[in-house]
Image: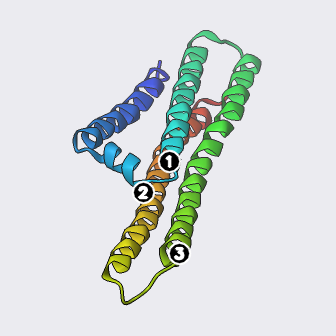
């Protein structure tokens, strides 16, 4: 049956994602991300991403096995409604990843502005060095969380788009 390809497509997307994650780990990007993001929102984004990815895999598997086993238009319609309704959680997670990334951006700028300029004396070279360190802490938090949030949101959107297209394709 053509439905066999559904889970394989999801597996391909996840496999490519895992390869990317392994490359990032080997290059030390996760350690750098963890060190530079003082809010640790990027870790929360990755947890939401992992959970939503597993959920998409379960829904894809449910759709694929349901198409093989379930007969009759009424039962299949129920399957499609179930999968489509549960996929909404994945789209919500993709939005949450993006919004957490933007929240980290705001926190980073707040850290940069509030923590950076309090007690600054422009004639002291040591104070200037400390100012630059605090500014870079806020800036790195802003950029890291934005990057992680956007990438995770894009990857989740791809997964749930494939699932939504499969539901549309196999609906009676």
Please tell me which residue lies in front, 93 or 105.
Answer: 105
8 shown above or below 123: above
Q: Are marks 1 and 3 in contact (CB under 8 Å)?
A: no
- C-alpha gap between disc 3 and disc 2: 17 Å
Q: Residue at x 65, y 44 (%)?
A: 92
Mark 2 neighbour class, 10 Å CA radius: few under 14, some 14 to 19, many 20 or more: many
Please tell me which residue lies in front, 125 or 135.
Answer: 125
Quickly name the residue at label 2: 144
> How many marks can you see?
3
Q: Residue at x 28, y 39 (%)?
A: 25
Locate residue 119, reporting x and y percent. 51, 79
Mark 3 neighbour class, 10 Å CA radius: few under 14, some 14 to 19, many 20 or more: some
Dot label at residue 15: none
First in residue order: circle 1 vs circle 3: 1
Mark 1 neighbour class, 10 Å CA radius: few under 14, some 14 to 19, many 20 or more: some
Q: Which residue lies most toward the left here? A: 27
Locate residue 120, reporting x and y percent. 46, 81
Quickly name the residue at label 3: 113
Locate residue 70, reporting x and y percent. 65, 12
Badge 3 marks a residue whose secondary structure is helix
61 shown above or below 169: above
Q: Quadrant of residue 132?
A: bottom left
Q: Residue at x 50, y 52 (%)?
A: 149
- C-alpha gap between disc 1 and disc 3: 19 Å
């Amino acid at each position: 049956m053509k439905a066999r390809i559904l889970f394989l497509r999801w597996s391909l997307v996840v496999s490519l994602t895992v390869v990317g994650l392994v490359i990032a780990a080997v290059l030390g990007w996760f350690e750098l991300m963890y060190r530079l993001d003082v809010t640790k929102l990027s870790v929360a984004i990755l947890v939401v991403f992992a959970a939503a990815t597993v959920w998409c895999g379960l829904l894809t598997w449910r759709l694929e096995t349901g198409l093989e086993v379930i007969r009759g238009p009424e039962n299949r319609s129920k399957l499609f409604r179930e999968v489509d309704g549960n996929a909404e959680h994945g789209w919500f997670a993709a939005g949450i990843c993006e919004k957490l990334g933007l929240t980290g951006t705001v926190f980073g700028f707040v850290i940069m502005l509030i923590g950076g300029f309090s007690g600054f004396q422009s004639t002291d070279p040591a104070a200037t060095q400390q100012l630059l360190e605090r500014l870079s802490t806020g800036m790195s938090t802003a950029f890291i969380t934005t990057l992680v949030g956007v990438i995770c949101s894009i990857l989740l959107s791809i997964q749930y788009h494939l699932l939504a297209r499969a539901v549309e394709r196999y609906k009676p």
